[in-house]
Amino acid sequence: MNKTQASAPARLPKRRAADLAYDKIETLISKLEIAPGSPVIEAELAEMTGLGRTPVREALMRMVSIGLIVQQPRRGLRVSTIDVMEHLDVLATRRVLEQLIATSAARRATDVQRKALLACARKMTRAAERGNLDDYMTADQELDHVNHEACRNQSAVKAVVPLVVQCRRFWYAYQHEGEIAEGAAAHLAMAEAIASGKAAEAVVGANRLMDYLELFTRRVIDT
C-alpha cells in the first residue's frame, strides 16, 4: 500500500438509487409535503425526486410493505394517516428495538462507522443551534443509516424502520411541542455511547433518546 492509499480517508459504501429514492420520498412524507391520506402518483414522485421511475417504484413498494403507504382497491396508493393515540405503542416497541440495535452497533461498528455516528450527531447539534429543522432531520436520517448498518442485525433494522419513519413524521406534525436542542442532545448521547463500544452505555443512550420521544408524545396528547 502506498502513502496515498494509506492516508486516504475510509468512506462508507455508496447507496443504491432505490435507497436514495426511498430517503427522498420518506422526507417528503415525513415533512408533510405529501400529506397523510394523499394519493401517491409514481410519475410525480419521479419528477419531484429527480430519479427514475424504477427506483421510485421499488421505494414505494418498500413503503407499502412497512405500512407508510397503503394500497387500496380501485383507489391506488395513498399515504397512511397519523394516529396520535397509538403513538405511545409505537414508541414502546421501538424502545426495545433501539436497545438491541445500539448494543449490537456498540459491539460491531467499524472505526469508520463510529466516527460517522458522531459526525451525524454533531451535525444535528449544529442544526439545532441554528434552529434549522430540515438540516436536523437530514442529519437524523443519516445517523439512522449508519447506526443500522453498524449493528449488522437486519431483522432488527427491518422491524424498526417503519417505527422510525412514523416517529419522524409525528415530530414534523407536532413540532410546536418539541425542543430541537433537547432532541439533538439525546441523539448525541446515544451516538457517543455507541461509539464508546460499551454495550451497557449504548442501552442507556438509546433509552435517553426514547425517553425524550415519549415525553414529546405525551405533551402532544395532553394538549
Image (cartoon, rainbow, N blue to C red):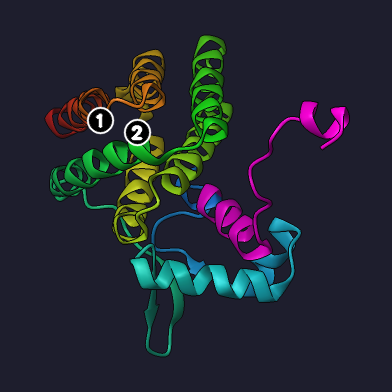
Image quarter in which the N terminus is found: top right
Q: Return the x and y of residue 213 as percentages of the image width and height.
A: 25, 30
* Frontmost residue, 139 versus 189: 189
Say left or right for 15 vs 186: right
Q: Residue 106: which disc?
A: 2
Give the SS element for disc 2. helix
Give the SS element for disc 1. helix
Image quarter in which the C terminus is found: top left
Say left or right for 132 vs 104: right
Tags 1 and 2 touching, CB below 8 Å: yes
Residue at the (44%, 38%) spot, across then down: 109
- Taking the magenta stretch, the answer to whether it contains residue 47 is no
Q: Where is mark 1, residue-wise?
A: 199
Which residues, given as a range, are shown in magenta?
1-27
Q: Return the x and y of residue 75 as percentages of the image width and height.
A: 43, 83
Q: Residue 169: which disc?
A: none
Q: Amino acid at mark 2?
A: Ala
Residue 182: in sight, yes or no? Answer: yes
